[in-house]
Image (tube, rainbow, N blue to C red):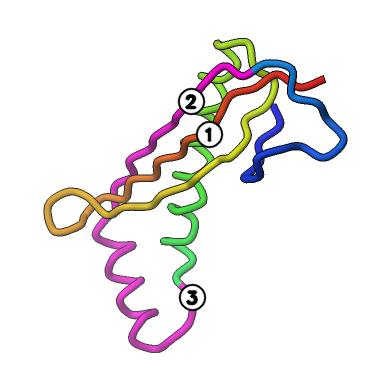
Amino acid sequence: MLVTTTQTLDGRKIVEYYGICTGEAICGANVFRDMFAGVRDFVGGRSGAYEKVLREGKDIAIGDMCDQAKELGANAVIAVDIDYEVVGEKGSMLMVAVSGTAVRVE
């Protein structure tokens, strides 16, 4: 499945549009990761634990979107948008939502 944030695919002709497809993932944070991220923020540097959660959430959401596009008969998703939101009590969860246009390309 080709996935792109652009409206077109260079060198490929779009032959059918199937409509919007989406994917979502909600990832919970845990106490130990929060504690170590707080220490990391205090001393400076990157928080690998949170970065890993962000990547995993994005990958899950894109995978769900691609599954939906495949069910529609698409072999590509164009114009993909990725949104991140903090949700839950005290911002304890991360939501990743993706959307794009399912298409068939030659």
Say whether marks 1 and 2 touch (CB < 8 Å): yes
Q: Is residue 38 shown above or below 30?
A: below
Q: Please check the rendered image and state whether residue 45 is part of the magenta-colored stretch, yes or no.
A: yes
* Amino acid at the residue labelled 3: Arg
Q: Position of residue 99 (x, y in %)?
A: 47, 35
Residue type highlighted by circle 1: Gly
Q: How many badges with numbers are in the image?
A: 3
Q: Mark 2 and mark 3 in contact? Answer it, CB < 8 Å.
A: no
- Residue 38 appears left or right of 66: left
Please report contact status of discs 3 and 1: CB closer than 8 Å, yes or no.
no
Q: Magenta part of the protein: which range? A: 17-46
* Percent x, y of residue 37: 35, 71
Q: Quadrant of the C terminus?
A: top right
Residue 2 lies in the magenta-colored region: no
Whether 93 is drawn above or below 14: the answer is below
On screen, residue 46 above or below 90: below
Mark toward the viewer: 3 or 1: 1
Which residue in the structure is indicated by mark 1?
Answer: 100
Residue positioned 74% across, 17% down in the render: 15
> Of label 3 and label 1, which has the lower sequence position?
3
Q: Which mark is residue 21?
A: 2
Work out whether mark 1 precedes mark 2 in sequence or the reverse, and give the earlier one. Answer: 2
As measured in the structure, the alpha-carbon distance from the residue carrying label 3 to the one carrying label 1 is 30 Å
